[in-house]
Amino acid sequence: MTKHKIYTMSFASVYPHYVTKADKKGRTKTEVDEIIRWLTGYSQEELETQLEKQTDFETFFAEAPQLNPSRALIKGVVCGVRVEDIEESTMQEIRYLDKLIDELAKGKAMEKILRK
């Protein structure tokens, strides 16, 4: 089976789209970064290093210091697919992030987005 194209895309090439999506709805880059750090365990400095290195999505999630155990609480539909039903782990991590960014753009409170 061939890998999905998103796996080889650089995380840095998609990151500005996350920020733009949030910004259009009055949210901030800082909130986007907080979500990414919460999900992956990267520090802000480590996140910036991954962006500078143009790390691909597969490596970005594979090298994540500490994937948040609460991410299993993320439920819902992204691109017509329920995130909790995705069997391939890397794709599920990518869709978790997409879902969190969607929630941010929809005005959900950070405490709820971060499953506190």
Image (cartoon, rainbow, N blue to C red):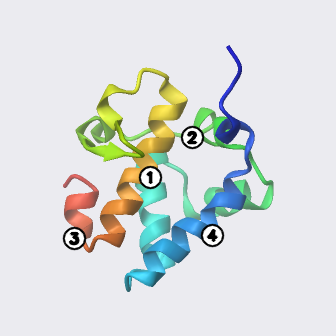
- Residue 64, numbered label: 2
Spatial CA span between label 1 and label 4? 13 Å
The residue wearing badge 4 is 16
Relative side of 91 to 57, left or right: left
Query: Given the image, on which type of amino acid does mark 1 rest?
Result: Asp
Front: mark 1 or 3:
1
Spatial CA span between label 1 and label 3? 16 Å
Q: Residue furthest top?
A: 1
The residue wearing badge 1 is 98
Front: mark 1 or 2:
1
Locate residue 28, reporting x and y percent.
45, 80
Report if the CB atoms under discs 1 and 2 are less than 8 Å apart.
Answer: no
The residue wearing badge 3 is 109
Q: Residues within 10 Å of mark 3 (few under 14, many from 20)?
A: few
Report if the CB atoms under discs 1 and 4 are less than 8 Å apart.
Answer: no
Q: Quadrant of the N terminus?
A: top right
Query: Given the image, on which type of amino acid does mark 4 rest?
Result: Pro
Q: Upstream in the sequence, badge 1 or badge 3?
A: 1
The residue that appears at 48% across and 72% down in the rendered structure is 21
